[in-house]
Amino acid sequence: MSTIGVLDENRLALIPPEHWKAHEFCFFLHDRLVQLLVEYESSGAHNWVTDAFQKVLAEQEGELGEIDILKFMKEHKLTEPYKHHLISHLVLALTSDMLHFLYEALSCFEKRKFTVGFALLRKPLKENLLFLSWLLGSQDDFIKRFESNNYQTLNGVKKEKQIEIFTEAIKKLATDDAFDADLIWNMIYSKNHGSGFESIWQRATHLITSQGEHLKTEDYSINFIFENPANDRFFEALYSKLPYLLMFVTQVTLECFSLILKVNDKTFSHLVISTMGCYEALFLTGKAQPVARMLNRTLKSFLKCVHCEAPLRINKDNAPTMYLAEQIQCKKCGLPSEFPLYWLFCIAKVSITKKQG
């Protein structure tokens, strides 16, 4: 089974071939978010308020003395600068922390270090994603809780509230029909959902577990201690859920970045369309490929082999490499062609309409 071509094949050597493309897809999503995070941090948008205060202080030649910026903005009802300052720092810090954990978790799975990998995967999906979704869907509620006694107000969030948080975040996404809050909750939090992550995370984190049908440590056993690292069963458990969750992570994070500074429409459309197109090609069963159908129709005049001029068509076999590595292989002559998606989307005016408000 071939790879997509976005990771060195040496890194895939210990992963079963049937999961190569899923692993590459997950790492691709991670890497694109890292790239966007770096760009946002470089923009300095999170420091606009601080910079403005420092400029005023410099002009006053120290006459104002030391200022607690947050307190000053609250007292003078500078609501928008106050929210921008908090949200921008929260989003960038939560995203950076989340991506560090995701990188190390995915790297561990490349080495079959399942216990460490699952333990590392737990925090970014159970906590960072919840907080980013909360900021996206109900920023005023999150900020109010963050301001005071957050060790209580942001801790021990119950199931109903978690589902509400995901529901409100999904409403803000351009592709809201692609995600389901209850499904996401079951994948991440349910102790009784047989195909969820929670029972695996608990076992990876604790030597002995007891709560829930799927969490009882067996007799004469200690969680994960006696697992054979050559056993492939954990890869199936991992990649049956992680790509969907990381798609959700990607779109939530994109929208959170826009709370700081609007994401470029072309960048947004390119990332969402290409990743959703890749997801449908890799993980949806049957012939269900709405993104591929749309692009085959819209990009028809560009879908020709540059070597033999034979017509090209996006399908399940060539789509992942086309979306992520921007290459498409001709069936007739067998040669690959460069396929610059960003440029093509701009020329053909292919875009995603973002939600307003």
Image: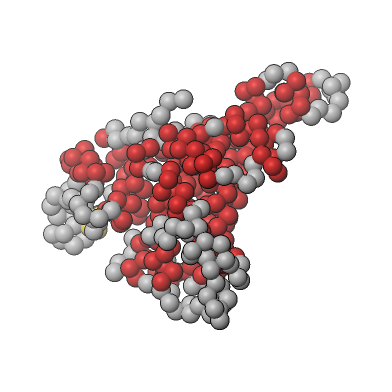
Q: Quadrant of residue 144?
A: top right
User: How many numbered callouts?
Assistant: 0
Residue at the location (66% across, 35% down)? 145
Asked whether residue 108 appears in the rendered view, the answer is no
Rendered-image quadrant of the N terminus: bottom left
Answer above or below: position of 112 versus 324.
below
Q: Quadrant of residue 180?
A: top left
Answer above or below: position of 210 versus 174.
below
Image position of 114 (left or right of 178): right
Answer above or below: position of 147 versus 118.
above
Q: Farthest top residue?
A: 76
Residue at the location (34% across, 34% down)? 352
Image position of 315 (left or right of 57): left
| Percent of width and height locating residue 113 | 53, 71
| Percent of width and height locating residue 226 | 53, 80
Residue at the location (19% across, 46% down)? 303
Image position of 127 (left or right of 347): right
Image position of 249 (left or right of 351): right
| Percent of width and height locating residue 45 | 60, 33
